[in-house]
Amino acid sequence: MSSRTTILEKIKQNQPTAISELPNLGTLGLESFEILDKYKAVLKGIGGDFVEVLNYDAIISFVKKNYATEKRMITTIPELAEIAATDWFNDDPHSLENVELTLVKAHFGVAENSALWVTDDLLGQRVSTFIPQYLAIVVNKKDIVATMHQAYDRIGNQEYGFGTFIAGPSKTADIEQSLVLGAHGARGLTVFFMD
Amino acid sequence: MKSNLEHSEAAAIFNKDVKRVDWHDETLWFVREKRDKAAHQIPEWELLRETASEIKNNVLSNMHDYLLEFESNAQKNGITIHWAADADEHNKIVHSIMEKHGVKQMVKSKSMLTEECHLNEYLSEKGIDVIDSDLGERIVQLRKEPPSHIVLPAIHLKKEDVSETFHEHLGTEKGNNDPQYLTEAARLHLRDTFLTRKVALTGVNFAIAETGEIVVCTNEGNADMGVHLADVHIACMGFEKIIPQRKHLSVFLRLLARSATGQPITTFSSHFKTPRDGKEMHIVIVDNGRTTQLGREDFRSSLKCIRCGACMNTCPVYRRSGGHSYHNAVAGPIGSILAPNLDMSKNADLPFASTLCGSCTNVCPVKIDIHNQLYKWRQVLVKEGHTPLGKTVAMKGMATVLANPMVFDFAGKAGRFVMKNMPVLVNNSLNPWYKQREMPAPPEESFREWYKKNAKESKDKKDE
Ligand code: SF4
């Protein structure tokens, strides 16, 4: 008998016979708070930064002022082509190794933990938000939801091959619980809020 | 594993360095306090725990069907599913995938299951080089030690230890103990690893039956760096990682990081549904004793565990004995319930490594009644003749004492007599709690005597 059959049969035999019903999630996440304020406070608390901008031009000038634009910048946002390359989607992902800054859009953000939801249609390549030294993500102010419950309502049965919540820069506290930003992924995250 | 010492013996050695033990204790308590702060910010925290517990109960009773649903959906997504009855079969499957691709190197992110199966040792015997990419895991790997905590693998080490290890293996400056500097050195070293490995192995935090996708949570981004740059992604999971629907992730992702480290969520919560174009993705679903545990009515709820580590951080015994003294991949209170299921005689000491204070049960995000199960394991182990003599005598004594208030009263008096007049009887191996602890001076009167007297006195006062 294959292990598959053995395992499944044993599970069938041994699992509890009394069926426990699935709980209703409808009563969760209804607490009310100022969504944008909460988002900003939590983001700061986990080492991220934010800038409120009116349009893409404002993002371009912010990036020019604050990042090393002589280094490699990549984006999936056509409006930012002036400062960042848009021709790398089919390259070998290893070739992104020298990227200084990646700029992408998020579908939405979550106030309670400042996470941003991105999927591969926004990423260009799956590794694009993990491999650069710095990361910037653009999100519309109206696309911030309160909690993870609204977040998954919004995701619903969205199709994707890969999706991830990103909350702040990569970090570790594995050496004596001292927090260090920039473990393997981005050392810094800037969130651009658009109106 | 490090040793075959029993928990109490290993703990005694750990306790020799008093300063270090105090530091270990305080560090973990600090993490526990962060958990409390995070939990208190969510007014519906208790409802969340209850909901998570109910979802997991539903999973236990529908395990068979959810696994089939998961398998068929994952296959539709282009993922290859493997089933492993035990650790050995798990290791063989992973190795066969490596062989098929003719690859001799692997990058691996955190997976307690592969620790449980001793995958690294197995692969290295086969000539395969495995690099653990989680910083804490990399540190202990370089030191040839197992992780001492499921979330904080190097929590038993001080920065000076890490500095020594990195100096030896990565050529960092001798005596530079700055965590920032040391982390940067590891970042550079591991970046090279990510760029050159063709096979990446990860654990699984949640597997969703409804969609056939898996979710992996990290703070460092190491799982993603490995997977997105490799040709083959192998994900290994115990079958209990299954949850019914995508929307249930909302509950678990709210609880997991807050319970673990007090963060509102891990930096990355990555949902892997299909392999990249032209690449491969494998999921190995492992039993290794879990079906047996599922059949033990008293212990099956231990399979609800989401591996947050909160029960360890809060445990007074774990904090003062260190993860390695549990000689099991998963240490602490939950490890002490899981381990005897795998091997009763080898792990008979673990359910005794607890004060049964119940703090673990209070913090567990999926409401496992951890301390009750530890107590129940003791009964089972004693009945089946698995406990060392010292503990059996002490336990039987304790059971009689607790069962009978008359004897309890007497034992209190007799105990004080023994401690005053024959301290050697207390200070011996029949009393596992004596180790590295000054027994408190026996009080002049027992609590019961005091209570009787005082209750009477206050009654007398009232009557005045
Ligand atoms: S038993 Fe509960 S508290 Fe302990 S690791 Fe598992 S989920 Fe966390």
Image (cartoon, coloured by chain):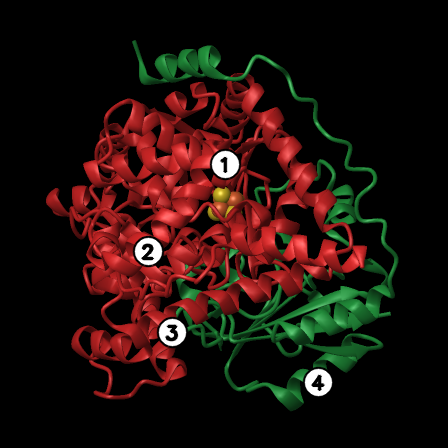
Residue B23's disc is 3
**Quadrant hosting residue B348:** top left
Q: Residue at x 78, y 80 (%)?
A: A57
Toward the viewer: A95 or B205?
A: B205
Q: CA distance from mark 4 to mark 2?
A: 48 Å
Residue B405's disc is 1
Direction from residue B73 to residue B394 in the image, left or right: left
- Residue B423: percent from left, percent from top: 24, 59
Residue under pointer 4: A62
Q: CA distance from mark 1 to mark 4?
A: 75 Å
Residue lying furthest bottom: A65
Toward the viewer: A92 or B295?
A: B295
Mark 1 or mark 2: name the one nearer the start of the chain.
2
- Residue B63: percent from left, percent from top: 53, 21
The amino acid type of the residue labelled 2 equals: Gly
Residue under pointer 2: B323
**Quadrant hosting residue B170:** bottom left
Q: CA distance from mark 3 to mark 4?
A: 45 Å
Direction from residue B165 to residue A42 in the image, left or right: right
Say which of marks 3 and 4 sits in front: 3
Residue lying furthest front: B464
Q: Chain of mark 1?
A: B
Task: Report whether mark 1 lies on the same chain as mark 3.
Answer: yes
Marks 2 and 3 in Cβ contact (< 8 Å): no
Say which of marks 4 and 2 sits in front: 2
- The chain whose colour is red is B
Give the position of the C terminus of chain A as an image quadrant: bottom right
Marks 1 and 3 in Cβ contact (< 8 Å): no
The amino acid type of the residue labelled 4 equals: Phe
Q: CA distance from mark 2 to mark 3?
A: 14 Å
- Residue B232: percent from left, percent from top: 36, 43
